[in-house]
Every structure is written in C-alpha cells, then in structure tokens.
C-alpha cells in the first residue's frame, strides 16, 4: 500500500514536470500554426485541426525579423570568435598554475556574478559615447566579449584540467617548444572543450537583452531579442500567430546548437568546481 | 624538486604569462574600472545631456535614495522576488534532480526538458508565458474556466494581487535549468558506497535524505542559494518584457527602477547611487556565503 502510494506520488511528480517544462514549448509550437480563429476559440486546443503555415510567411515578411536575425548572427559569431581566441592561453594558465593568479580567478568569477550591470552600464555608456561607439556593433561586441569572458574562461579551464599533465611534460622533455606543446598537444585535445565554450558564448550573446537595449537604438541595427520584444509590445498580442512563428524561428539556432553540446555541457558545468 | 613536479613545466613559461596579462588587464579596464567610476558617479549629480557636466554632491544621492519611497518599495519587491524565486527553484530543481537520478524510463526526457529552457532568451520566455497567460486565448485561464476554478476571471499577469506570485513562478521556471544541472552534478559526487552502507544499515528513505544526502549537498546548496538570490535580484529582461513593472508597480524590480532612472530620465548620478546600494546589499549576501563556506570547510 505504501509502495503504491509512493509510486503514485512519483508518477504525479513526473507528469507535473513534463507538463510544466514541456507544455510551454508545445503551446508555442501550436500557436505558430494556428489561424486567428483557432487562437480565439472558446476552448483552446494545443494544436489546430488545420495547420496554418501563413504565420511563418507573415513573420518573415513583416516586422524586421529577418534583418534582426542576420544582425544577431553577425554579432554572436564575431563575439564568439574573439572569445574563443582570447580564452585559450589564459584558461590553460589558470588550470596549470596553482598560485596567486589562479586563486584570484576564482574570486573574480564570483565577483563578476555580482557586478551590477545597472551600475557598470553608466560609465560604460558614457565612455562608449565619447568614442562614438554607441549604437554601433563594435561597441556592443566589446561589451559582450568582456562580460562573457569570466565564465568562458572558467568553463575551458575545467576542460584543460581533464588533460593529463604528463602528456605535455613528456612532449616537453622530448624537446618540444612551448608553442609546439600548445599547438600539437593541448589544442587537439581541447577541441571538444573549445566547441562547448564557443556554443555557450554564442547562445549567451544570441539571447542577451539588457546591453543591446541600452546600446542600440537604430531600428536597422536591432538584435533579435530586441525586435521580438518590440513586436510583442507593438502589435504582437493581436497577432499571436505571427509572433509565435517568429519566436520559433528565433529559438531554432540556440536550441539546435545547444542540442549539440547539451550532454557535454551538463557534465562539465561543475567540472571546474568539483575538480578544484 | 617536489615543487617542480607539482607545477607543470609548461605553466612556468614566461610567454604564457605574457599572453595572459594583456587580456586580464583589458578585462579589468572594462569591468573593474567602470565599477569604480560608477561608484564615483554616485557621488555626483551627473545627468545625461549634450554636455557632460557634474558637481560633487557627496552622499546626497544616497540620502535621497533611502528616503525615496518608490525605490524602497522596489527594493522590497526585489527582495521578495529574489527570495521566492530562489526557494521555489531550489525545491523544484532538487526534486527534479532526484527524479532524474533514479534513472528510470522517464529520466532522459526529464533531463532534456530540464536543461533546454537554459538556451532561451528571457525575452522569448516572456513571450511564451505571455501567450500561456493570455486571458482570452491562453490555456491556463482556459482550463481554469473549463473546470470553473478560482482565477478564471482574472488576468493573472495584470491583476494587482496575482501579478507578483505569477511572475515568481515564471522566474523559477527560468532558474530551473542551472539549479537542476548543479544538483545533478553534486548528487553524482556522493559516493555510492555511502548510500549502500546506509541501505544495509536499514535506514529509511527520509533518514538517508536528512542524514546523508542533504549534509553532503550543503556546500552546493549554499552556493546555489547565494548565486540565485544575486542573479534574480539583478534580473531585468523577463519582467521588462512581461509586465514592465506593472500592474501598479507590483512587479517593479530594482533593475527596472535603475534602468528607468538612468536611461529614461537621464539621472545618471542618482541611478549610480541606487546601483551602489543594490551592489552593497548583494556583496553582503556574497560575504555571508563565503563566510558559511569557510566555516563548512573548517568543520570538514
């Protein structure tokens, strides 16, 4: 009897979590293929009887979604490229060096979590304004690179720690130079880690809202989250179908990329912390 | 000799330090320096206009902030929001992690569902929940209406009494992936032998939870609580898009308040002081966390 009760309890919990976490995605997907008349039906259903794909062409034709999509691709790709290049050597250094700098890194990562964006944005805004980088992609990209650096560094450091140190010492003893060790021993082994860091950075930048909101104002330059937020505020509640379609389009790249690294990311998320 | 063995040979390469320092210097320049400048701005009456001019006003901004009832109210809402979201996300995330760790047929699907919201922008989460909660076309009010439950006739997001609790649930939904992944990783670090030994000793499930699992997870629990309170207190995008602080200021988080003060009204000096007050509060939380962590380490 008790066993049955606990089975029932667990079953209820599983159903609750599946609906709570998965339901919103399904509803969005359903909305994106509903005709206006289905959306306003008195008894809402998850998926309509007749899918209405015109929402997707509506979303693509109007509301600047395509342009914002391309803007976001550009900004995310360039930021990711810079971070991926900048992060390799320092991540290696912090993984292998157990001295003062390494300890400071942990503190810095922690402190960077409290850096109140609302406070640093003011001097940052004034400085970028002074050098004419407001409303420009270079200004936004600089901010993205710096903001994402601490965690990317931390993540990659975890991957370096999983490379046996004997490998590089052996190469070293065999007479390889530092550059050769990095290029021929570390980098090939670090490729999976680099992919995780790159995808992670890309998704973070792809989704970012606050800095883009403050630093971009030209309607031609808006990123996808800004454009979607504007769409919702302006007319989206009256055109849920097209809004849902645009949202599905916006989700595809980040979900697709995330699916690639999902397992590795979950496994390594705390690797740095656990391995110390 | 032993010291050389401990340190990697390569890590002592001067080139590596040379390559790392400019990066660190650059980051300090764009993250630490602005924080200091922001702190200094809070002592001025700087306003956003065509000419940048400012006077030193000392702690005047802080005085005004602490007697600004709108800010204090926003701070109070922020505290309720951050604490409630954290507690709810911790409970849900822990339950979810335990379910996934059972490794039954439902575990893979739960794991995927638990991590995927992480890949979404707060803006997109806001749009999805706006649709779910829409009083005319959303399923939530739809089902409440169908089964004649309370709440069927109110718009949960726009009603003065239900707005904050509603966005707290959405905030927990958004926080769930990080909490769940962290708990999953931490659960894996508990040695299986310990659990097996406890099983042989004939402990009940609740005893194992109370005496074994929770004490083992204490470090990760304190870390997650501290970080989630900090992250959520600074939260912006979700609420900005979903309610923009409404209805009647019931969801007006401090992040929104500072944003409006600086970029809508241009009161940079005052906004910086508000930012400083928030930072000090968060640093205190961080300090408590570091202190408890050190104490735990000493005990261990």
Image (tube, rainbow, N blue to C red):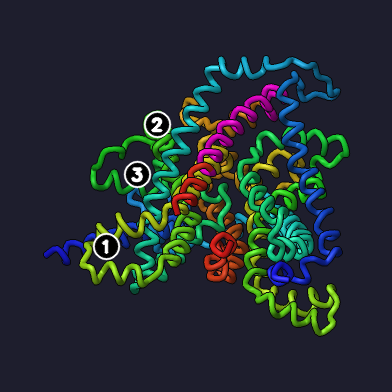
* Front position among marks 1 and 2: 1
Measured as percent of width and height from the top left, residue B299 is found at 44, 50
Residue bearing the label numbered 1:
A10
Query: In the image, are marks 1 and 3 on the same chain?
Result: no
Measured as percent of width and height from the top left, residue B297 is found at 49, 51
Query: In the image, are marks 2 and 3 on the same chain?
Result: yes
Q: Main secondary structure of the magenta part?
A: helix
- Badge 3, how many Cα within 10 Å: few under 14, some, many 20+? many
- Badge 2, how many Cα within 10 Å: few under 14, some, many 20+? some
Residues drawn in magenta? B262-290
What is the quadrant of the C terminus of chain A in the image?
bottom right
Q: CA distance from mark 1 to mark 2?
A: 34 Å
Measured as percent of width and height from the top left, residue B171 is found at 47, 45
- Badge 1, how many Cα within 10 Å: few under 14, some, many 20+? few
On the picture, is A157 further left or further right than A245?
right
Q: Residue at x 86, y 59 (%)?
A: B18
Give yes or no for residue B278 being in the magenta stretch. yes
* Front position among marks 1 and 3: 1
In front of the other: B94 or A248: B94
Circles 1, 3 touching at the beta carbon (< 8 Å): no
Q: Which mark is residue B141?
A: 3
* Front position among marks 2 and 3: 2
Circles 2, 3 touching at the beta carbon (< 8 Å): no
Residue bearing the label numbered 2:
B159
Read off the chain for label 3: B
Read off the chain for label 2: B
């Amino acid at each position: 009897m008790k066993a049955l009760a606990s089975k029932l309890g667990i079953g209820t919990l599983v159903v609750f979590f599946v609906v709570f976490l998965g339901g919103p995605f399904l509803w969005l997907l359903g909305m994106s293929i509903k005709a206006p008349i289905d959306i306003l039906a008195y008894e809402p259903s998850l998926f309509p009887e007749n899918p209405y794909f015109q929402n997707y062409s509506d979303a693509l034709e109007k509301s600047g979604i395509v342009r914002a999509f391309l803007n976001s691709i550009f900004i995310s790709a360039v930021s990711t490229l810079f971070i991926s290049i900048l992060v390799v050597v320092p991540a290696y250094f912090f993984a292998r060096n157990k001295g003062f700098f390494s300890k400071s890194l942990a503190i810095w990562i922690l402190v960077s979590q409290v850096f109140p964006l609302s406070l640093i944005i003011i001097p940052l805004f004034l400085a970028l304004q002074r050098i004419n980088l407001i409303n420009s992609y270079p200004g936004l990209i600089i901010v993205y690179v710096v903001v994402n650096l601490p965690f990317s560094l931390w993540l990659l450091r975890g991957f370096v720690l999983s490379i046996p140190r004997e490998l590089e010492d052996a190469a070293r003893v065999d007479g390889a130079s530092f550059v050769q060790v990095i290029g021929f021993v570390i980098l090939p082994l670090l490729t999976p880690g680099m992919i995780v860091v790159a995808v992670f950075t890309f998704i973070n930048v792809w989704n970012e809202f606050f800095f883009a909101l403050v630093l971009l104002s030209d309607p031609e330059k808006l990123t996808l989250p800004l454009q979607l937020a504007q769409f919702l505020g302006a007319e989206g509640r009256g055109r849920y179908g097209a809004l849902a379609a645009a949202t599905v389009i916006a989700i595809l790249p980040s979900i697709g990329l995330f699916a690639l690294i999902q397992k590795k990311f979950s496994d390594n998320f705390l690797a740095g912390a656990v391995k110390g | 000799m032993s010291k050389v063995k401990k340190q990697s040979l390569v890590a002592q390469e001067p080139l590596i330090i040379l390559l790392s320092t400019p990066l660190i210097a650059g980051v300090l320049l764009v993250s630490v320096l602005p924080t200091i400048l922001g702190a200094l701005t809070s002592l001025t009456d700087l306003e956003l206009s065509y000419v940048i001019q400012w006077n030193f006003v000392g702690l005047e901004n802080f005085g005004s902030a602490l007697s600004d009832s709108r800010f204090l109210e926003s701070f109070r809402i922020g505290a309720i929001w951050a604490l409630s979201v954290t507690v709810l996300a911790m409970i849900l995330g822990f339950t979810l992690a335990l379910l996934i760790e059972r490794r039954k047929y439902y575990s893979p699907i739960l794991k995927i569902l638990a991590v995927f919201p992480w890949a979404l922008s707060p803006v997109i989460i806001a749009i999805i929940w706006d649709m779910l909660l829409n009083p005319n076309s959303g399923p939530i009010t739809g089902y409440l209406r169908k089964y004649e439950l309370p709440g069927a006739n109110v718009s949960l997001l726009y009603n003065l009494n239900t707005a904050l609790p509603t966005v707290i649930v959405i905030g927990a939904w958004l926080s769930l992936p990080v909490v769940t992944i962290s708990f999953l990783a931490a659960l894996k670090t508990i040695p299986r032998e310990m659990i097996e030994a406890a099983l042989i000793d004939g402990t009940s499930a609740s005893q194992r939870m109370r005496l074994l699992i929770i004490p083992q997870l204490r470090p990760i629990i304190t870390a997650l609580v501290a970080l989630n309170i900090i992250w959520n207190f600074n939260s912006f995008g979700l609420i900005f898009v979903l309610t923009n602080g409404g209805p009647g200021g019931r969801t007006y988080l401090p992040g929104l308040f500072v944003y409006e003060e600086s970029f809508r009204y241009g009161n940079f000096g005052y906004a910086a002081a508000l930012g400083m007050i928030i930072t000090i509060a968060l640093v205190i939380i961080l300090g408590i966390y570091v202190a408890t962590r050190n104490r735990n380490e000493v005990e261990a």
